[in-house]
Image (cartoon, coloured by chain):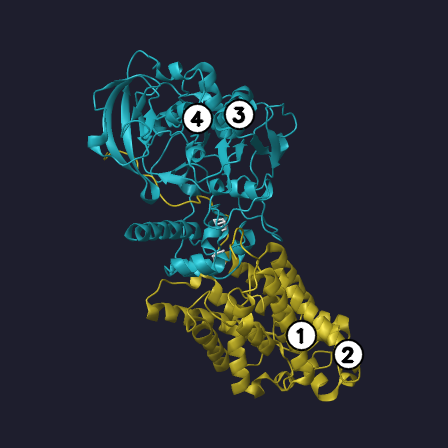
Chain colours: A cyan, B yellow
């Protein structure tokens, strides 16, 4: 864990770690006995065309609500053992589909047949549930005029090496993925953004190359937009509104691999950060329970430890080892109970640390007063709530240990709900 | 499910840089130590009595408030102890005990808790308290009379008092190096210039105070005093004399920098500091009071919320 340095004249610089010159190979996690796939849609039983006991093959698409509806791609061959609702952070509701792994692996041929002439429809219909979570919706949205795709070879949060690994070791897949993307979307401007120190030694992959600064949160999409593409995202808008789609290097590699082999990739690379802070790359089937990852890597867990999906500054903690590896699970951090720092209910002492460190130049000291009092709309109108890029630094440095970032996310979530309710009432 | 391990679930971020309010308080107290120890050596047991009493009563008042308001005990954060220490540093060693206790009462209860507790005080609580005491029991704060029984081996007059009454002719007995080394009469912890500067530099380097405020405070004072001095060297003392006497240095490093009553954005901090520095010299040179630091800081505390509205535009802010 990074601590406040002894001498502190300016704001601290928190650096992204680089993968060493010699790329470590990910450790393979054995085929799990059961996988759980999270389908991003609430569970409505009558819409589900499959049931417990159905046999599925590796690479088989399981979709609800017919053609074009949300789907998952099975990462193993076996039988469906459970279908249940799953509740995530901030009102996220999913359907969890568990599949018991069978003895013999069989590949589904559906995609292979369609992968010859690559089209946007094929990609959207089959590759939305692949490692790196590529999303094609923005390309098909008539309201969004996408003109640039940024392939990002780093991770937004700290300690995560997943996309760096992809960019270092899978450059061929990425190159192929880029040409596929160009072909199916018709977008010519593709930018590869990588941590600055990785720029030298990069071959030609048919894209413009940008080096991203190594200090946190330079790798945040909105920061890349601001600093590298010189496009400012107005508060409350996202990058896609500005015509830019971000895809992780792993996602592009998945696309490239899928179209060159005719098989839908089903193994996710993730970074395991152990209790002592060491990192290890893992390769696991999508849906593998975290517990399998821990036991394969010799991580022992105790009562009151903390398990974090994602990075230490922006991830989310989970309560069970059964939580599966998802398509966007780039990291899992295990924190010993001794290293857990708790928040407090102290008021803001106006020390200004958060104001100094906030990359979006938000007056966090004022914002937090309004958020604590629940005045969300004023917070948004006068104190720049929507300029926040969700980096978590304000909470990280808060002398009073106020859960500032939690307040911010909650406020955004609540305002989002209010606005949605208003929109339906109109 | 029953034999499953229970994990801690909480919101991101999962790291914290380890800073805390108590760390800030205790290190600020540590930074004050050179000046305080010097005062204790200079003024002996009475000074020790004042400092001990002010720290302990400040803590006791806070404890009583905690009990009355039924809020959790907050003395562990060190804020009350720090307030007591700073209060004591600014008192003459001869102050009777009941003024000390009243002073810390005003600081903790009125200056801090009436405004809503830590982080909500609009004014520096200790400055509020001393200003009230000065109005009520002015004679006890006459450093010349108060310290008449001491034999120091240097002019036993309060430099700013002499300056005000008799002009620069009366302060030739003070050398700047002497002032820096504490050869002047004054409050317990405010005379040892070098000690205060060392403490201030420590606080700045460790990031416990906002350096913009201290530096602009001193710069504002320096400039204003220099202009006065150039205009009339007979009547107005030079900038270094002003910086090394009275509450100037304690003001620059321990009073003006108080978190909740000062701005946090860069330009406001510079205006705030410089404003307090300039006002101090104005009050000293053409105002009615001998020392202007306290009033200058109170005035700048008052405009702080307005000043702090000058801030950079947030990223992506739409007009
Ligand atoms: S999370 Fe905090 S520090 Fe980061 S952009 Fe938002 S307000 Fe600023
Ligand atoms: S870091 Fe925390 S205590 Fe300091 S000003 Fe920001 S919110 Fe207030």
Where does residue A4 sit, x and y in percent of width and height? 55, 48
Indicate the chain on which mark 3 is placed: A
| Pointer 1 with pointer 3, Cβ within 8 A | no
Indicate the chain on which mark 1 is placed: B
Residue sticking out furthest to the front: A142
Nearer the camera: disc 1 or disc 3: 3
Query: Left or right: A195 with respect to B197?
Result: left
Mark 1 crowdedness (10 Å alpha carbons): few <14, some 14-19, many ≥20: many
Q: Secondary structure at mark 4?
A: helix
Alpha-carbon distance for marks 3 and 2?
72 Å
Tell me the quarter of the picture where residue B189 sits: bottom right
Residue nearer the viewer, A54 or B221? A54
Q: Secondary structure at mark 3?
A: helix
Q: Which residue is mark 1?
A: B278
Nearer the camera: disc 3 or disc 2: 3
Nearer the camera: disc 2 or disc 4: 4
Q: Which residue is mark 2?
A: B229
Alpha-carbon distance for marks 4 and 1?
68 Å
Q: Which residue is mark 3?
A: A178
Where does residue B95 sit, x and y in percent of width and height? 55, 81
Indicate the chain on which mark 2 is placed: B
Alpha-carbon distance for marks 2 and 4?
79 Å
Query: Left or right: A136 with respect to B148?
Result: left
Image height of A36 relative to A384, above or below: above
Residue nearer the viewer, A297 or A262? A262
Q: Is residue B183 visible?
A: no
Image height of B58 relative to B169, above or below: above
Q: Which residue is mark 4?
A: A120
Mark 4 crowdedness (10 Å alpha carbons): few <14, some 14-19, many ≥20: some
Nearer the camera: disc 4 or disc 1: 4
Mark 3 crowdedness (10 Å alpha carbons): few <14, some 14-19, many ≥20: many
**Residue drawn at the location 55% of the way across and 19% of the way down:** A172
């Amino acid at each position: 864990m990074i601590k406040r340095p002894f001498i502190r004249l300016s704001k601290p610089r928190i650096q992204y770690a680089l993968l060493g010159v010699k790329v470590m190979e990910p450790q393979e996690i054995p085929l799990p006995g059961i996988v759980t796939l999270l389908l991003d849609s609430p569970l409505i039983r009558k819409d589900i065309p499959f049931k417990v006991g159905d046999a599925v093959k590796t690479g088989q698409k399981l979709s609800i609500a017919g053609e074009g509806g949300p789907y998952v791609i099975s990462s193993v061959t076996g039988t469906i053992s459970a279908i249940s609702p799953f509740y995530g952070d901030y009102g996220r509701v999913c359907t969890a589909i568990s599949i018991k792994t069978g003895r013999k692996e069989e590949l589904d041929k559906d995609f292979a047949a369609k992968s010859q002439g690559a089209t946007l429809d094929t990609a959207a219909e089959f590759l939305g549930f692949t490692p790196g979570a590529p999303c094609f919706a923005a390309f098909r949205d008539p309201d969004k005029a996408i003109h640039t795709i940024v392939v990002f070879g780093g991770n937004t949060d700290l300690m995560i090496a997943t996309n760096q690994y992809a960019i270092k070791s899978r450059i061929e897949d990425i190159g192929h993925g880029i040409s596929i993307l160009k072909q199916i979307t018709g977008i010519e401007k593709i930018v590869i953004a990588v941590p600055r120190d990785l720029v030298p030694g990069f071959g030609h992959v048919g894209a413009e190359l940008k080096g991203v600064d190594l200090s946190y949160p330079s790798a945040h999409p909105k920061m890349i937009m601001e600093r590298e593409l010189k496009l400012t995202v107005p508060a409350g808008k996202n990058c896609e509104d500005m015509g830019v789609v971000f895809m992780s290097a792993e996602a592009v590699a998945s696309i490239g691999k899928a179209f060159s082999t005719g098989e839908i990739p089903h193994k996710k690379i993730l970074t395991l950060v152990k209790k002592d802070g060491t990192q290890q790359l893992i390769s696991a089937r999508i849906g593998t329970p975290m517990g399998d990852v821990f036991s394969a890597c010799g991580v022992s867990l105790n009562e009151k430890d903390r398990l974090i999906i994602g990075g230490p500054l922006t991830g989310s903690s989970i309560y069970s080892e059964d939580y599966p590896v998802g398509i966007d699970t780039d990291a899992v951090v295990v924190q010993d109970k001794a290293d857990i720092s708790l928040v407090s209910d102290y008021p803001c002492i106006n020390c200004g640390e958060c104001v100094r460190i906030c990359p979006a130049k938000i007056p966090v000291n004022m914002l937090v007063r309004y958020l604590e009092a629940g005045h969300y709309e004023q917070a948004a109108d006068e104190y720049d709530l929507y300029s926040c890029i969700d980096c978590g630094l304000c909470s990280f440095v808060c002398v009073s240990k106020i859960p500032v970032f939690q307040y911010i996310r909650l406020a955004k979530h609540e305002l989002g709900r209010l606005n949605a309710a208003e929109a339906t009432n109109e | 499910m029953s034999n499953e391990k229970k994990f801690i679930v909480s919101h991101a971020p999962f790291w914290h840089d380890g800073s805390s309010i108590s760390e800030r308080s205790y290190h600020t107290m540590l930074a004050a130590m050179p000046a305080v120890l010097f005062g204790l050596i200079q003024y002996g047991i009475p000074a020790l009595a004042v400092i001990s009493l002010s720290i302990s009563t400040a803590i006791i008042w806070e404890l009583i408030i905690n009990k009355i308001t039924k809020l959790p005990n907050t003395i562990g954060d060190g804020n009350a102890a720090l307030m007591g220490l700073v209060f004591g540093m600014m008192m003459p060693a001869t102050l009777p005990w009941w003024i000390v206790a009243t002073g810390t009462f005003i600081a903790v209860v009125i200056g801090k808790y009436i405004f809503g507790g830590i982080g909500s005080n609009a004014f520096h609580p200790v400055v509020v308290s001393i200003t009230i005491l000065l109005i009520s029991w002015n004679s006890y704060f006459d450093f010349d009379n108060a310290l008449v029984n001491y034999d120091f081996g240097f002019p036993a007059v309060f430099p700013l008092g002499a300056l005000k009454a008799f002009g620069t002719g009366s302060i030739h007995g003070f050398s700047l190096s002497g002032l820096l080394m504490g050869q002047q009469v004054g409050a317990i912890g405010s005379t040892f210039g070098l000690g205060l500067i060392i403490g201030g530099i420590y606080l700045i380097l460790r990031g416990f105070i906002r350096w913009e405020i201290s530096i602009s405070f001193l710069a504002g004072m320096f400039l204003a005093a220099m202009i006065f001095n150039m205009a009339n060297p007979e009547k107005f003392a030079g900038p270094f004399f002003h910086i090394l006497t009275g509450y100037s240095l304690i003001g620059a490093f321990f009073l003006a920098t108080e978190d909740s009553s000062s701005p946090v954005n860069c330009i406001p901090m510079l205006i705030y500091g410089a404003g307090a520095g300039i006002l101090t010299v104005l009050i000293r040179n053409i105002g009615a009071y001998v020392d202007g630091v306290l009033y200058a800081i109170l005035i700048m505390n008052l405009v702080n919320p307005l000043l702090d509205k000058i801030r950079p535009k947030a990223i992506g802010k739409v007009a």
